Image (cartoon, helix red, strand yellow):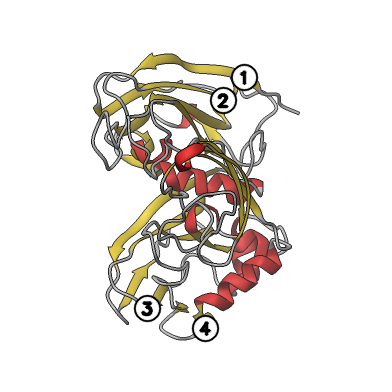
Amino acid sequence: MGFWLWKPFKSQKSFDSDAGTEVFDLPDRGIISNLLLESYALSGTQKVSIMSQDIFSKIEIIGNGSTVIQSLTGTQVQASQARDDGRLSEDKELVPSGGCYGYFDLRLGRFVGDQLYALECSKWDSLELKVTYDLAAGGTKGTTGYTTGTGKLKVHGLYSPDGVGLSPLGYLKKEQKKVYTTTASGTEELELPDDYPYRRLLLCHKTNGYTMNDPFRYITLDINNGARKPIDNMDGEDEMALERALEKNIMYHQLVEIYLAGADYLYPRLGFVIGGAYFSETTTLVGGDIGIADVHVHAGGVGEGYVHAFGFWPERTMDIDFEKWSGGKHGRDAMLDCLGYDEKAAIVLKFTEWHAGVAAQVVLEQYATK
């Protein structure tokens, strides 16, 4: 049996600027199980619904200068983590002038310490970690974004320096495959690749005021031009119900620190509709998920406290998971068990949309070899 060591790949450093891409060289030998990125930034002066994940528009592991090993947004990294772990990753919602930490775990295996799937560094001429960030995070630095000059990052993880006793079958490749904005009753298609077996498809959106299945009203997985349709015009709500059954109705928990100043907003990490919720002694969450408030309100309606929220769709993602569908198989066996075909078939993912204006993405995870 092999063994893993904890390795600091990069000690904490300040961002080179408030926005940009930083590149870190990875080892040229040994085996990497995961790269855990820990970020820090000081929030601005205004209370808004952004989190540390919003700083990172792209986090990538690149081999040989151009081969994508993993390429996801910060939110998508945390969505994949949550689906693996059955809980949300740690991330702090922006509160006025507070220190905010985020944790982004790029896993090269099905779990940290997986000996069947990991990244063998010696099989690549070069390996790089690339992090693209912006402290504005969709807002304005210093007010609705993060504070200029406060961004920091460190990277560590499990690593086998010589790889003795470890013989991985491959690694998990994870990549955003499609980004689009919905149109009312529109249709979208995504031709899936034929290079490696599929692990899961994550169907994501991050637009306030819309349900989980707004961008994915009906879903079809078409193989060889209709020869087989394992998913055939499946209602998004039915897909969500199937997920709950496969995950044994796991409810994801979010602890939200809130600051009361007349009105407040809960960051939508769990899949319910968010238009904005006013927090007082009685807290209401829009969209039917569960919220339990522990809020102290000062005179004049200004105060601070916490809300415990529970929901089923972490980071607003739907999960077509072939490992779960196959009862725990992995690699090509899982795909064959679910679909009756492997990745060499012509496989197309299709969806019919519901409402217009929803920003949506599709992420594919695969069992890759090198």
- Residue 323 picture location, percent across and down: 64, 59
Mark 4 or mark 2, whichever is nearer to me: 2
Instruction: Report the residue marked by disc 4.
Output: 228
Q: Is residue 29 left or right of residue 210?
A: right
Earlier sequence position, callout 2 versus callout 3: 2
Q: Residue at x 30, y 25 (%)?
A: 147
The residue singled out by tag 1 in the image is 6
* Residue denoted by label 3: 354
Of discs 3 and 1, which sits in the foreground? 3
Mark 4 vs mark 1: which is more N-terminal?
Answer: 1
The residue drawn where x is 44% and y is 60% is 274
- Mark toward the start of the polypeptide (4 vs 3): 4
Residue 160, given in percent of the width and then of the height, sits at 61, 22
Q: Is residue 59 above or below residue 217?
A: above
Residue type at mark 3? Trp
Q: Amino acid at mark 4?
A: Arg
Q: Residue at x 71, y 26 (%)?
A: 2
Residue at the spot of label 2: 157
Could you tell me which secondary element the residue under label 1 belongs to?
strand
